[in-house]
Image: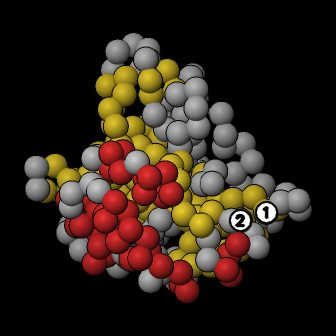
Amino acid sequence: MCASYGLDPRFTDAELISAVDEEILDGLRAWARENAGETLRPTGKNLRNLNPVIIDADGETAVEPAWWGFLIDGAPSRFPSINTRSERLQERPGSLRSRAIVPATGWYEMKKPERVWHEFGLDGGGLFGMAAVTQRGRTADGEWFTCYSIVMRPAPAHLAGVHDRMPVLIPTPFARDWLRAQGDRELIDAALLAAASLDERVIAVPRADDKGTDRLF
């Protein structure tokens, strides 16, 4: 599953969403620069880690800071919630009612049993979007946030030797559909088909450092 991911401010902008304007892209770059050297991570009980996601706000595309993983009764959920299996959404499409796109330039997984971290991304280092489902949640102090869970699917053959799962990537032509279409079984099926169009462009590179090893709470 997606252990951590990053947003490099040097990204190219061709892969994300055609509706994103320069103001939004500039905002993403500014956020990434402010967090230089840090990979996004699940938020623990004593941490507040809000990360940019792209949402549909009354027919307009917008960026909103959101909490990775679900908050339930004022605390991070006791069940794993930073990732959601695509198979589960196919079986229970009700979770697709609210969705987002998570901008990233790479994600990180450990290859086992070697315990070597790998960075995954698109060739060329472009910005891309990962499918996410969302719900509202509050912290212990009563503050409400949009919470998100990255949708995961089986990895294609050329990546499965490193890790057997990967995020559902949303190609630009499908971005509006993911954000605005009716949330049903047909939508997740279409998202998986669209994501497969990017498979050949996804690469995995071993990291000499231990990037990601301290990113879990």
Residue 123: where, in percent of width, then height? 55, 83
Residue 88: where, in percent of width, then height? 49, 51
Crowding at mark 1 (Cα within 10 Å: few <14, some 14-19, many 20+): some
Q: Residues under labels 1 and 2: Cα distance?
A: 6 Å
Of residues 100 and 216, the one nearer the viewer is 100
Q: Quadrant of residue 209?
A: bottom right
Q: Quadrant of residue 200?
A: bottom right
Of callouts 1 and 2, the N-terminal one: 1
Residue 27, above or below 15: above
Q: Residue furthest left?
A: 58
Is residue 113 visible in the rendered image? The answer is yes
* Local secondary structure at mark 2: loop
Classify residue 184 as left or right of residue 70. left
Residue 161: where, in percent of width, then height? 76, 73
Residue 130: give its label.
none
- Please identify the quadrant where the C terminus is shown: top right
Task: Look at 78% across and 55% down and name the residue there.
Answer: 210
Q: Quadrant of residue 192?
A: bottom left
Crowding at mark 2 (Cα within 10 Å: few <14, some 14-19, many 20+): many
Say which amino acid is labelled 1: Lys
Q: Mark 1 highlights which residue?
A: 111
Is residue 8 visible in the rendered image? The answer is no
Say which amino acid is labelled 2: His
Task: Look at 24% across and 74% down and name the residue there.
Answer: 18
Marks 1/2 in contact by CB < 8 Å: the verdict is yes
- Please identify the quadrant where the N terminus is shown: bottom right
Task: Look at 11% across and 56% down and name the residue there.
Answer: 59
Q: Mark 2 highlights which residue?
A: 163
* Local secondary structure at mark 1: strand
